[in-house]
Image: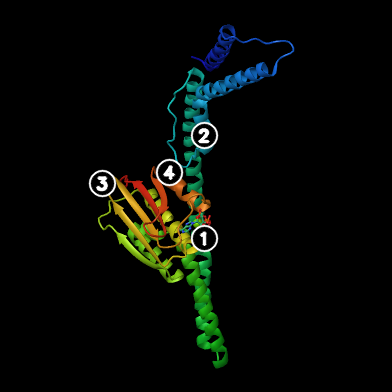
Amino acid sequence: MSLFWRIFALNAVVLGLATALLLWAPVTVSVPVLLTEAVILVAGLAVMLVANAALLRLGLAPLDRLTRLMTTVDLLRPGQRLPAAGGREVAELIRTFNAMLERLEQERATSSARALLAQEAERRRIAQELHDEVGQTMTAILLGLKRAADDAPEPLRKDLHEVQEITRESLDEVRRLVRRLRPGVLDDLGLISALTSLTEDFATHTGLRITRRFDTDLPALAPETELVLYRVAQESLTNAARHADAAHVTVALRHTDDSAELTVTDDGRGVEAAREGAGIRGMRERALLIGGGLEIAPAPGTGTRVQLTAPVSRKH
Ligand SMILES: Nc1ncnc2c1ncn2[C@@H]1O[C@H](COP(=O)(O)OP(=O)(O)OP(=O)(O)O)[C@@H](O)[C@H]1O
Ligand SMILES: [Mg+2]
């Protein structure tokens, strides 16, 4: 039955009942109206309104469900759909809405994939330039300083050594930056080494105690999957260091037959589910990019656990 006829029928039932009651009940309305008659009429009206409201609510329930889904749907958690229940128009509306969600999710996935790939390409380019231009120039400066220091008289030599030291530190910093921008070890040595060096870097720079639990017999993963696992580990560690007030973080990489699973668990103050910034959304987008799922939940005890499950697709 269409929504129009359903609502019409509901109203007809209520009005019909009221009329039948008027016809058969010993009700009289005098002119001018008596107080008791007025009270009876108003009570009748109230009963009719309540019945009408209840029936309308019943008739419009599928629309309510649709509205709730519309306001809460999150494209970063795809796959939420409503069963096409209810009357003809409502079912049609739900089907259209489901189709629209499907389209939006697909478009979102392609556009965020494009943005992430562009971002990675840009990072690679910046890393390359930092390495080739700034890195080389600073190395040349270092060599020049060393030559000058060797030939310089004593008071000047000390100064030159100091400048040399500062330059060396800056060069180290540039190298670290290059590594962060482009985890070159990923290409050269694979995910485990990249994650090991990432966690070691983190431990020295933040003072966090980091435990690694890596499965050794990890199957070969597609390069983009490895990059996503690496970036999610990087952001989770950054978050643990910045927000969690944690002392200890565990980074685990496990695998089953058809999935690899990265978990970063801290023992900090825990995360509120409602607060998701660019970092967490970025992790979700990256997970979607490789058909994986990301879950952020309270860790057992205190703290936060970030878990990325990535489907294993063999290296091609
Ligand atoms: N491990 C954690 N422990 C406690 N709170 C956390 C943790 N990770 C995230 N949060 C909270 O969730 C919020 C959102 O994190 P998200 O990474 O999305 O953004 P951000 O770190 O604030 O900024 P950025 O865009 O630079 O990552 C944080 O501001 C923080 O309050
Ligand atoms: Mg963050």
Label 2, residues with CA under 10 Å away: few <14, some 14-19, many ≥20: few
Instruction: Determine the residue positioned at 52% across, 21% down.
Output: 55
Q: Where residue 123 appears, x then y in whole percent?
A: 50, 55
Q: Amino acid at mark 1?
A: Glu
Label 3, residues with CA under 10 Å away: few <14, some 14-19, many ≥20: few
Residue at the disc numbered 1: 129
Q: Is residue 309 left or right of residue 268?
A: left
Q: Amino acid at mark 3?
A: Asp
Q: Taking the image as drawn, is residue 190 in sight? A: no
Local SS, label 2 = helix
Does the beta carbon at disc 4 come under 8 Å from ligand 1?
Answer: no
Residue at the disc numbered 3: 257
Considering only order in the chain, which callout, 2 or 4, is on the residue closer to the N terminus? 2
Instruction: Determine the residue positioned at 38% across, 45% down.
Output: 292
Label 1, residues with CA under 10 Å away: few <14, some 14-19, many ≥20: some
Q: Where residue 101 appears, x then y in whole percent?
A: 49, 32
The quarter of the rendered structure image containing the C terminus is top left
Q: Where residue 153 appears, x then y in whole percent?
A: 55, 92
Residue at the disc numbered 2: 68
Q: Amino acid at mark 2?
A: Arg
Local SS, label 1 = helix
Res 288 label: 4
Considering only order in the chain, which callout, 2 or 1, is on the residue closer to the N terminus? 2
Considering only order in the chain, which callout, 4 or 1, is on the residue closer to the N terminus? 1
Compute the Cα span from label 1 to label 4.
Answer: 30 Å
